Every structure is written in C-alpha cells, then in structure tokens.
Amino acid sequence: MNRTVLIAGGGIAGVAAGFAAARAGWQATVFERAAEFSEVGAGVQLGPNVTRILQAWGLCDALNECAAFPSGLHARSLSSGEVLATLPVQDFQTRYGAPYVTLHRADLHGLLLKAAAREGVQVHSHALVQKASQSADEAVLHVMQQGQLLLHTADVAVAADGLWSPLRQQLLGDGLPSFTGHIAYRALLAQADLPLHLRSQDVTVWMGAHAHVVSYPVRGGESLNVVCLTEGRLLDDEANHLQALQTWNAQKSEAQTLAELQHALRGACAPLKDLIGACLDWRLWPLCGRPVMKGANQHAQGRVAWVGDAAHPMLPYLAQGAGMAIEDAQALAAQLLHASSANVPEQLQQFAHARWQRNARVQARAVRNGRIFHASGALRLGRDLGLRLMGARLMDVPWLYGHRQS
Ligand SMILES: Cc1cc2nc3c(=O)[nH]c(=O)nc-3n(C[C@H](O)[C@H](O)[C@H](O)COP(=O)(O)OP(=O)(O)OC[C@H]3O[C@@H](n4cnc5c(N)ncnc54)[C@H](O)[C@@H]3O)c2cc1C
C-alpha cells in the first residue's frame, strides 16, 4: 500500500520535503496557497552542508547551470572599505566535499520543483490549507481548492507554511512571530550595467555600526544581489498591520527608501555608497522571528512535522534558513525511508530529536552574528582586530559546514 505525505506550503522547505519524501518511496502532495508556484526574493547563499545534500539528490548539473561559485567571502569595514579578513571558499569542495554557492532564490526553488515533478510529487497551487487534524491512524489537511473545502488524509502531514505558519499557530499555539527590529532592503543589479570597480563574483559583507551590507553574484554571476540590513523601527500602524510585516516585497517611495538607507549607511566608504546609489529598485523586508527552538516538540507532534521557517525562522546573518529547510527535508526523508504507516509518530519523534538542537544552534549563531556585524565602540575594535589577526579561522564554521546527517 502507498505511504502518503501531505505538505502545506510550496516554498523551498515544502518542495524539498516533497522531493525527498518521494525519493524515499512516499507519495507526496504539496499544497501552496499562492496562485502560482514561484519564489519571491532575490539571492541565497548555500554552504557545503547544503550543496552536499543537493549533490546526493542528483541536482549537481541543475545547480551548475544557475549558481555562481565565489572564490572568497570578504569581511570589510563599512566605513573604510578595508578588507579585514577573507574566507577562501573556493577550496570548500576539497575541504568539505561540496562547494559554497550563491544563486537566485527562484532558481533554487525552480530546480527543486522540477526535481519534485520528476519524482512524481503532486503539486497544487491556489490551495489554501486551513487546518490540520490527526487521529491515531491518519493526518488530515483541510484545504480550500477552487472554492471548495476538501479534506485530504494521509499517513503524515508536514507544515512547511513558513514564518507565519498558520498550522503552527493552530497546533502548537505559541502565538505569532514578532518584529526583530531589523529591516532588510534588497536590490538586484545586472553586473554589465555596473562600472568595473563595482562588479564582483565574490561574497562581500561590509560591517558598520547598527547596519551591514551583503553583496554576492547570482544567475551564474550575471547579476549582483545587494542586501542592506539595518536596525530600525516600523511605524506604529505598520507594526500593527500584519500584512505589512508578512510581505517580502514592500515598496516605499524611492525617495523615502533612499533617505532611510542614506541615514543608516551615512558613514559608508565611497565605493559602497556608489554601489548603493546604483541600485534603483529597492524592496523592503521587515525581519520577524521567534525565540530559538526549545525542544523536539516544536518539530513534530504525532503525525505532524514542522520544517523550515515554520519550525525555526532565523535571522539571515548566517545565511542558513533555506539551508536548514533542506537539511530538515533530508532528515525527514531518512526517517520516512523505513517508516510504515503504523510507526510514523515514532519516526517523526526521531526526526525531531535529530534536528531541533542543530536548528536551535544555527538560530542562536545567526543572532550572535547580527550583534557582531553591527558592533560599535570597543566591541567593534575588538572584532576588527580579531579579524585582522585570525582572519579566515574566525569566519569558518566547521561544525556547520562539515555536518553530515547520521
Ligand atoms: C534577507 C534574507 C536573506 C536570506 N538569505 C539566505 C541565504 O543566503 N541562505 C539561506 O539558506 N537562507 C536565507 N534566508 C532564509 C530563507 O529565505 C528562508 O529560511 C527560507 O526561504 C524559508 O523557506 P520556507 O519554505 O520554510 O518558507 P517560505 O519561503 O515562507 O514558504 C512558505 C510557503 O508556504 C505557503 N503557505 C503559507 N501558508 C499557507 C497555507 N495556509 N496553505 C498553503 N500554503 C501556505 C506560502 O505561500 C509560501 O510559499 C534569507 C532570508 C532573508 C529574509
């Protein structure tokens, strides 16, 4: 008899989970509320802990077609432009067995979606999951499709419905995420349109007081993804307006955005100011989050599992949110491989125990990175000195990049 899994949410976590479950011999169905399967946003960086999984999934060629392969990750002072340290990532293939890549989010999502379709995953767009319920024998998703409420049953339900996860709110009841006080402004530039000194095929992080800027190549190096991360407040009505917080594509007026950015980056060096000035179409992304995971019960209960941002939203300062979603998918599939319908709850418990501490550690490290990137005063002097003296050793994260699922 077919073993079946229903997945709420068709972002990177949901599509990766569907694909991995199908590879493990399960019949997977993904429900996405959006009318079209698409992935908004701009770039993502993926460390070797993630590209190793994509390689094992046979997605090397697809990745090679759209990813960029930076040679280094440079930490620079936002004010002077000085390169404080460089982590050479071109040797990650040798050191960690897989490359460090940067790519457009839509390209990553697209290659996972294609792979899922090849594995026979059924994907439904315009399918809003309203509720999940479960009994000892089955999990049920209540899905609004084409104006009708349909009840789908399966052995497992996976909530991959993102940061604002309605299924988390329904089943775990731990409330809504809150605004972190950090705002991301992002833009995408064609490298060909930039003067030579602003083009780059590497990852660069400019660190300043209460703000930093990250840039890296996407679309095989043809475009440059630029993200400015600032500390700020939302207007009261914005903070109270959930929809303003939930969008990835908020646009203020050009003048208002530029004024905010110029204020946040007022001490920036000339090349960085030039780069920011070259970006015209900024999108605003208020960063919201939850406290670090506290236990395995936040990853699975009974026949329902949470993966990706639904389980462990994280600040982007370690560039691992999508990566952890892909690791979740692989770990879930490893448990499902030998599961039968009857022992699903035990297998999901094992998945939860295998994952929650690592996800909590990555969440906590991302918060710590944010403090280090935005340091001022004595902390900043200490950081810069440490980077000059210890360089790559401070920037490398072997426990993260060297991780292999047992
Ligand atoms: C500025 C920034 C930079 C980042 N950079 C990186 C990086 O470099 N590397 C990295 O690994 N990560 C990065 N991340 C994190 C990464 O983007 C997220 O962790 C990842 O996209 C989460 O994927 P997800 O599928 O869990 O959630 P989402 O992408 O939010 O997907 C959830 C999906 O569920 C759907 N959905 C929601 N509710 C329902 C419902 N009721 N019914 C049906 N469907 C529903 C939504 O429409 C959506 O498609 C970054 C994040 C930010 C903000």
Image (cartoon, rainbow, N blue to C red):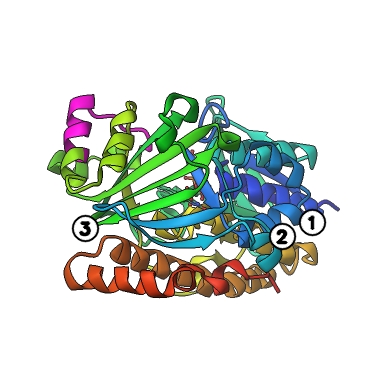
Query: Vertically, is 236 above or below 211?
Result: above
CB within 8 Å, label 1 to label 2:
yes
The residue carrying mark 1 is 24
Secondary structure beneath dot 1 equals: loop
Identity of the amino acid at label 2? Ala
What's the magenta region?
248-261
Q: Is residue 54 left or right of residue 86?
A: right
Magenta-drawn stretch contains 257: yes
Question: Which picture quadrant has residue 352?
Answer: bottom right
- Disc tally is 3
Q: Nearer the viewer, mark 3 or mark 1?
A: 3
Magenta-drawn stretch contains 267: no
The residue carrying mark 3 is 209
The residue carrying mark 2 is 333
Query: Vertically, is 276 above or below 266?
Result: above
Identity of the amino acid at label 3? Ala
* Residue 71 drawn at (x, y percent): 57, 52
